[in-house]
Image (cartoon, grey):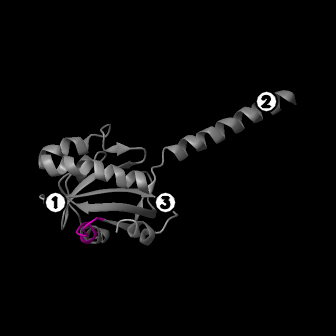
Amino acid sequence: MRKFFCVFCFVTVLVFSFQNVNAQDSATPEEVYQLVLKAYPVLQNLKEESFSAFNDPKGEFVYKNTYVVVIKCPSHTMTHPFAENARGMEMPERFSWFPTMCEAANHPNGKWVEYEWPKPGETEPSRKISFVIAVEGTPFALVAGIYTDSGSVDDLNATLK
């Protein structure tokens, strides 16, 4: 009985430790926003020459469970650190959220958008929120987001004013 109790305690500690690690691996909206702001001058100054940095899955623009993507409105994904086939890809019309992202990018301080997209390895869509902003002096915009069931996009956008 004592052995069972010790194993139970050990497993319980492992489970809670694993959940805590996963929670720490989830970026917050503030971290997403800061990551995009960090990427802004890089894309603004280097333009296409910066694409290799945004395509690097171990690079400075991948953080916890988020990453920065460069888009070219109205229809192209220019970079993606985890999907080589998405680089330079014209987005199919079925991705109805892409024009919404492009519209949001043109707000002076950027904008948060909400849409449904499957999590990696899943087929059913989940709620995703992303911050998007056009980069002055370029034809590009930056996007980074997280999957979350909480938080109001309106509240996040109110903080950008």
Q: Nearer the viewer, residue 21 or 122?
A: 21
The CA span between labels 1 and 3 is 29 Å
Range of magenta residues: 103-110
The residue sitting at 43% across, 57% down in the picture is 29
Residue 102 location, x and y as percent?
24, 68
| Mark 3 in CB contact with mark 2 (< 8 angstroms) | no
- The residue indicated by pointer 2 is 6
Q: Is residue 60 above or below residue 43?
A: above
| Mark 1 in CB contact with mark 3 (< 8 angstroms) | no
For residue 28, side relative to residue 54 (left or right): right
The residue sitting at 18% across, 68% down in the picture is 74
Provide the secondary structure element on which disc 3 rests: loop
Within 10 Å of the Cα at label 2, are there few (<14), some (14-19), or many (20+) other Cα atoms?
few
Q: Earlier in the sequence, mark 1 or mark 3?
A: 1
Q: Which amino acid does label 1 sit on?
A: Glu
Q: Which of marks 2 and 1 is in front?
A: 1
- If the image is split into quadrants, where does the C terminus sit? bottom left
| Mark 2 in CB contact with mark 1 (< 8 angstroms) | no
Q: Nearer the viewer, residue 54 or 134?
A: 134
- Most extreme residue toward the right, as rendered? 1
- The residue indicated by pointer 1 is 136
Q: What residue type is labelled 2?
A: Cys
- The residue indicated by pointer 3 is 148
